[in-house]
């Protein structure tokens, strides 16, 4: 049983008043062992060069040579180095803790929903993300003028609470066509490809491999071997999914411009252009094409081997399975 939920040595960016705008953790760790946790006990807050040197020696003695090397390297960032410890999986209470939790996800140390992000959105400052790092919005006009006076332009990529993931970490074995469309706090499993119109929010992601050409909203998890077609959407915790975790099982296909508002099991398909929400009325067909029952789509949540389509003449949403009428009725009413 580990003693720390997470730990990181990071470099902070601040505004002119000393408020933290972001924190970069090159090597965040999760589920810290008892032995290493004892070395890190009491190590928190800003660290100077002498403290980092002492920490480096202690980590090396504990067998963590990589951590020791990082502590030595960070000594060059005078006054900007912070040690952040997460004693347990409690909601973040500072910008530094919020960024550590986001790093843990994007570094694949934890998966979405495995670290508590309650209240995170309110902690993060809204800043301008520039080619010179984060800039406080109140200081932005002066920084833009300073750049012009030097004959250059301060390039602003976005104004947001969340930066793009690739400015902090690029996980191994992924392709990202448009890096601005993957936020820090996204989890990209090995083999994931995010095309130009794909998008992955924080506390969401893919097991990989998979092709993502649609939107993975906050809180949504996409299983191994599943593909999201161009322009499709998933309803997350911030876009209508509420407290229900919307997930896509293994080897599923969400068609182009389709949508999903219920959890899917494995090997499911949603026809292009069809949006299935919890309240969508679905005519369930057996293997002979006969309608067994008309139900709300939420009844099928988490079921595997389903094909959702819209009848081209009547517009009725239909669900086909590979089960017989008797098997299907038993499946539908198993929880009643």
Image (cartoon, helix red, strand yellow):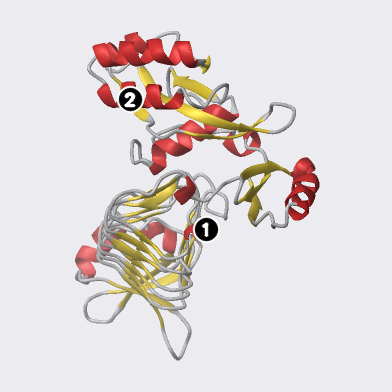
Q: Secondary structure at mark 1?
A: helix
> Which numbered disc flags the more N-terminal residue, 2 or 1?
2
* Residue wearing tag 2: 69
Point 48% across, 22% down: residue: 84
* Residue 277 location (% of width, % of height): 49, 63
Residue 146 position within the rendered picture, expressed as x and y whole percent measured from the top left: 76, 48
Using the image as rendered, state which of residue 35 and residue 290 is in the foreground.
35
Quarter of the picture containing the N terminus is top left
**Mark 1, residues whose alpha carbon is within 10 Å: few (<14), some, or many (≥20)?**
some
Contact flag, marks 2 and 1 (Cβ < 8 Å): no
The residue most toward the bottom is 313
Q: Quadrant of residue 302?
A: bottom left
Residue beneath the point at 59% across and 26% down: 94
Q: Write the residue at 27% across / 63% down.
A: 329
| Secondary structure beneath label 2 | helix
In the drawing, what numbered circle is on residue 180?
A: 1
* Residue at image coords 30%, 55%: 223
């Amino acid at each position: 049983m580990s003693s720390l939920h997470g730990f990181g040595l990071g470099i902070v960016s601040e505004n002119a008043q000393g408020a933290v705008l972001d924190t970069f953790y090159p090597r965040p760790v999760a589920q810290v062992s008892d032995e290493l946790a004892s070395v890190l006990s009491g190590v928190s807050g800003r660290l100077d060069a002498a403290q980092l040197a002492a920490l480096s020696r202690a980590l090396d003695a504990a067998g963590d040579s990589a951590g020791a090397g990082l502590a030595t390297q960070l000594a060059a960032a005078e006054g900007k180095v912070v040690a952040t410890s997460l004693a347990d999986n409690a909601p973040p209470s500072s910008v530094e803790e919020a960024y550590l939790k986001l790093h843990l996800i994007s570094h694949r140390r934890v998966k979405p929903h495995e670290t508590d992000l309650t209240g995170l959105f309110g902690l993060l400052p809204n800043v301008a993300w520039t080619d010179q790092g984060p800039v406080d919005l109140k200081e932005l006009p002066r920084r833009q003028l300073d750049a012009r006076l030097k004959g250059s332009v301060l390039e602003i990529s976005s104004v947001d609470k969340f930066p793009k993931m690739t400015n902090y970490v690029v996980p191994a074995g992924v392709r990202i066509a448009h890096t601005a469309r993957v936020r820090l706090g996204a989890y990209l499993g090995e083999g994931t490809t995010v095309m130009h119109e794909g998008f992955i929010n924080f506390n969401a992601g893919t097991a990989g491999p998979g092709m993502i050409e649609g939107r993975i909203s906050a809180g949504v998890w996409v299983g191994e071997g599943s593909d999201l077609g161009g322009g499709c959407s998933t309803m997350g915790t911030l876009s209508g999914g509420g407290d229900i975790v919307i997930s896509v099982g293994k080897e599923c296909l969400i068609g182009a411009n389709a949508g999903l508002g219920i959890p899917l099991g494995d090997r499911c398909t949603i026809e292009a252009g069809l949006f299935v929400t919890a309240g969508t009325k679905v005519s369930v067909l057996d293997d002979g094409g006969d309608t067994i029952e008309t139900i709300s789509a939420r009844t099928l949540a988490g079921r595997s081997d389903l094909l959702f389509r819209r009848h081209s003449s009547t517009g009725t949403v239909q669900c086909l399975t590979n089960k017989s009428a008797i098997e299907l009725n038993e499946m539908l009413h198993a929880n009643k």
